[in-house]
Structures are given as structure tokens and as C-alpha cells.
Amino acid sequence: MSEAARKDFHTKAQEKLTPDSSKSTLDKTKESITGAADKTAREAQPDSNKTTTQSLGDKLGRSKDNTVHGSTHESVGDKVKGALGMGKH
């Protein structure tokens, strides 16, 4: 994967397989920040503009996020608008 803000699948797998108990606070913080950046980049580019592998990986990631965090079927932009009181009434 060549996008600068994206984590490659190898890095994601390595982070998941390494126990938190063996990570430093700096490593955990870095993973959290780069994970958030990866999710933002994932949503910024339409699946139609991605490779098949990247598109499938992103769909699986969204599916996991929806399962873990619940789904409102709103975009990130809609959620921000709602939080600012500019959403649908």
C-alpha cells in the first residue's frame, strides 16, 4: 500500500499479535494515533478508487467497527454535524 496515512496489513497484524503488556506507553500511543489516521484515510477515499485488496480490507474494518461500536449508518461528517448541532432536525 503506498498511501502515506495508511497502515499496511503487515503492520496492523503485527500490532494485533503483540501483547499490550510487552508494548511501551509510547508504542501504544503511536498505535492509537496512527490507527485513527488510518481510519480517517479509509473513509476519505471511495472504495471504487482503491485496489481490490484495500477495498476488501477497509470493508472488513468498517464491519468490525460497526459490530464493536454499534452502527448508526451515519458518515463521520454527519456525526460531526450532529455533535455541533448542525445535523438533521
Image: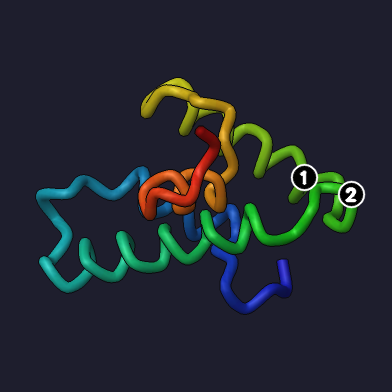
Q: Quadrant of the N terminus?
A: bottom right
Residue 57 quadrant: top right
The circle drawn on residue 55 is 1
Asked whether disc 1 touches disc 2, contact meaning CB atoms under 8 Å apart, the reply is yes
Percent coordinates x, y for residue 76 in the rendering: 53, 48
Instruction: Decide if residue 27 is on the left or right side of residue 76.
Output: left
Percent coordinates x, y for residue 62 in the rendering: 57, 35
How would you rate the neighbour count of disc 2 (Cα within 10 Å): few for under 14, some for 14-19, many for 20 or more?
A: few
Q: Nearer the viewer, residue 63 or 54?
A: 63
Q: Amino acid at mark 2?
A: Ser
Q: Nearer the viewer, residue 55 or 87?
A: 87
Q: Amino acid at mark 1?
A: Ser
26 lies above or below 83 = below
Residue at left offset 68%, top offset 35%: 59
The CA span between labels 1 and 2 is 8 Å
21 lies above or below 33 = above
Q: In front: mark 1 or mark 2?
A: 2
Element at label 2: helix
The circle drawn on residue 48 is 2
